[in-house]
Amino acid sequence: MVTVVPLRRRQWMLGATCAALATPWPLRLLANGAATAWLEGGRATPLAREAVALLNAAADDGLDPRDYDAEALARAVAAADTAPLPTAAAARLDGALTAAMQQFLHDLAHGRIDPRRIHQRYRVAARSDFDAATALQTALARGRLADAVRAAQPPLPLYGQLRAALAVYRALGTPAAWAQPLPPLPVPRGSRAGKLEPGQPWSGLPLLVQRLQVLGDLAADVPVPPRYEGAVVDAVRAFQQRHGLAVDGVVGRATVAALDVTPAARARQIELTMERLRWTPLMQAPRMIVVNVPEFELRAYEVVDGRIHVREQMRVIVGRALDTRTPLFDETMRFIEFAPYWNIPPSIARNETVPRLRRDPGYWQREGFEFVAPDGRVDTVLTADKLDAVLAGRLRIRQRPGERNALGDIKFVFPNNDNIFLHHTPGVALFERERRDFSHGCIRVEKPVELARFVMAGMPGWDEARIREAMAGGTSTTVRLAAPVPVLIAYGTVLVKNGRVHFYDDLYGHDARLDAALRGRASPAHERGSPFP
């Protein structure tokens, strides 16, 4: 007997017979005595019919049934229902069904793309607890293939919510409301940009009302008003809130751009988010911090009995989309620095700080800068020669603790190759913006005291009063966390909150990159070649 090898991507067990499969599968016998999992006497079993139904429904999970040769397998199983298949044909069908189901389960659990291809640097192997071959064996032994599918799906409430949302947006398709673009917005006197404000008439109101009704932000029985007012304004505010826009009821360029995205395009956005969830390690530890970059939000949560309980949530500021993007990775927070120094990165010193100091030497004293030599010696006197030494790498510049310090009064350290960390900031007004990509790559947090309380929970003596005292003390102090906390920098452009689907802009283009990678990859079914006409 041949030993079966667990399926790996693009390795299909073509032509395999169930004689190659390990027990305890419910084996049948072909006419020549060979064992098969899916046929009996050359005819398809109920399990074979269930398998092709599951493969054809792979799109419900954002997957592509063509990757599993679903239509050809369905035709072959239907043929086996009509008349017994010859031994060789039955063996081919049996092996192909097994390979397709294993590939489907593997893709459902682990995803179809290696995240490192699109620049995610997650260290944790996704779903290391799930093996497609073993799950299929167990399901066949019990006669319940759907059990294997449920076990393969990411064990996250958000995944199930997105799956339901995908069905809704797929059902919408691309309705007539998107067959033509919204007409130009009114241009207020003295303004160059068009915008629609409450109380104004607009020729696009019928189309606006229709789109809001299709998307569920406006009740279907609301008539088109003569002016932009009432329930339609409220519906626009609801739409803006679900799309990461300023919730002001004013229809401007950003709101129109979001309204122009068709339900079919939103369905694809949901599919891409489901793919990311398959390899984003969201539940790797009992306590975690997750920053969702496109949403500009941080959540600190605990996992209790397999359920996520959010303990703290706050706004964040992330790296600029244009040139200083925050990388996606996971690391472990091990330290907190109270009243930290800011060691200015060489690139910032070279491109920003040194040129500013040459133009405005008073900036040195105002900001509390100092030079630091390789041996640790500190020099607070500014000279042109020392600035040259900074550019040559012989000195570096750092900012002393204080109210103007760029890191604020606290820094959360999770050592990583990119030197990314969480910190507070004196520029708190930026947290009020809807779009918050203003940093050089590090992540500024809105509520540093609350975050410190979360990560220092259980550390004797570190209550809120002491945390605030250490932040305001003016003396740089590093504290090692008693229990390190994993930090995940994630990227999800679709979430479900309070039963409503929220969409966010593809800030860094990662969705577009994932979409291109999925479309450009060779289909496993195409690579192996279908054994059926």
Image (cartoon, rainbow, N blue to C red):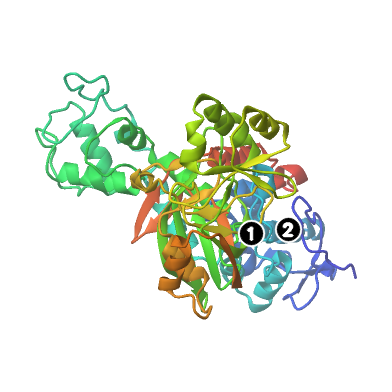
Above/below status of 319 relative to 204 = below
**Residue at figure coordinates x 19%, y 49% from the top left:** 219
Of tags 2 and 1, the one toward the viewer is 1
Q: Residue 455 in the image: x percent, y percent?
A: 52, 69
- Which residue, given by chain and number where applicable, does mark 2 sit on? 99
Residue at the disc numbered 1: 331
Q: Closest to the observer: 387 or 128?
A: 387
Quarter containing the C terminus: top right
Residue at image coords 60%, 35%: 349
Q: For mark 2, does the 10 Å Cα neighbourhood hold few (<14), some (14 to 19), or many (20 or more) residues?
A: many
- Residue pushed farthest front? 381
Query: Is 518 situated left or right of 262 in this image?
Result: right
Q: Is residue 422 visible?
A: yes
What's the amino acid at mark 2?
A: Ala
The image position of residue 457, as x and y in percent, is 50, 75
Q: Quadrant of residue 277?
A: bottom right
| Dot 2 or dot 1, earlier in sequence | 2
The 10 Å Cα crowd at callout 1, few under 14, some 14 to 19, many 20 or more, is some
Camera-side residue: 415 or 47? 415
At 51% from the left and 44% from the top, the residue drawn is 368
* Secondary structure under the numbered disc 1 in the rendered image: strand
Amino acid carrying label 1: it is: Glu
Between the C-alphas of marks 2 and 1, the distance is: 36 Å
Q: In this view, does 251 lie above or below 31?
A: above
The one of 171 and 73 positioned closer to us in this rendering: 171
Residue sitting at 9 percent across and 33 percent down? 226
